[in-house]
């Protein structure tokens, strides 16, 4: 696999380089993106405004494969901003909580989901962070602590006595 890959991601009305920014992943992959799309990231916006001459924005905390997926999200939502996600979630089924496109977008394996959360947080893309965190919340909704531990491969390091004490302290959380 090549260490550097240039990929042009543009919309129909995108013109010259002054209308685009190049986002560079930690893996040195570069993605040419319309400014309107790239500026959905508050981090990119701050960096672009701080150095107006630079056309390349380094994102050392985001792998190329993850950045590619983040860019797909930003492209889709550049012209149709996502609605706020209702909290608490009314369903564990994401398609009942967000539009189908968004539900499909976060229908990924856990590793990629958590990398998307980290990327959305680092790049400061609040709607994407909300969406990915809502997906994690949907994976927890309605499950017992044991089921949650199994889903996320969490080892229970409480003694039975400690676990009972925590349950007693938080009895209100289990009430319907």
Image: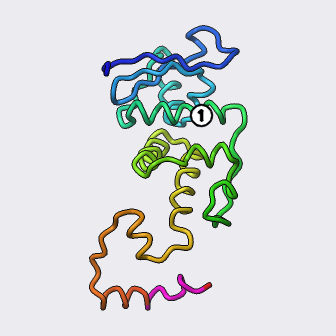
Q: Residue at x 57, y 32 (%)?
A: 72
**Between 92 and 33, the one nearer to me in the picture:** 92
Residue range of the region highlighted in magenta in the rendering: 168-175
Image coordinates of residue 107 in percent, x first then y, are 54, 48
Question: Residue 147, percent across and down?
Answer: 44, 72
Disc 1: which residue: 74
Say above or below: 161 vs 95: below
Q: Quadrant of residue 66?
A: top left
Residue at the image point whose x is 31% and y is 20% from the top: 3
Is 174 contained in the magenta span? yes
Q: Spot the residue most to the top.
A: 16
In the picture provided, is 2 more to the left or to the right than 53? left
- Residue at 30%, 88% (x, y): give it: 160
Image quadrant in which the C terminus is located: bottom right
Residue at position x 62%, y 30% in the image = 75
**Magenta-highlighted stretch: main secondary structure?**
helix
Residue 106 in the image: state x and y as whole percent: 55, 47
């Amino acid at each position: 696999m090549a260490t550097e890959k240039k990929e042009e991601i543009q919309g129909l009305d995108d013109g010259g380089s002054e209308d685009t920014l190049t986002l560079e992943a930690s893996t040195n992959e570069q993605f040419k993106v319309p400014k309107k799309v790239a500026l959905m990231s508050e981090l990119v916006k701050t960096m672009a405004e701080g150095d107006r001459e630079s056309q390349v924005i380094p994102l050392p905390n985001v792998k190329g494969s993850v950045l590619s997926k983040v860019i797909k999200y930003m492209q889709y939502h550049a012209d149709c901003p996502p609605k706020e996600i209702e909290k608490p979630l009314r369903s564990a089924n994401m398609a009942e909580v967000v539009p189908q496109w968004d539900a499909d977008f976060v229908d990924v394996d856990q590793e990629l989901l958590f990398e998307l959360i980290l990327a959305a947080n680092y790049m400061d893309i609040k709607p994407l962070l909300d969406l990915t965190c809502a997906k994690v919340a949907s994976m927890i909704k309605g499950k017992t602590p044991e089921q949650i531990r199994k889903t996320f491969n969490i080892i229970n390091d409480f003694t039975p006595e400690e676990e009972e004490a925590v349950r007693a302290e938080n009895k209100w959380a289990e009430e319907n």
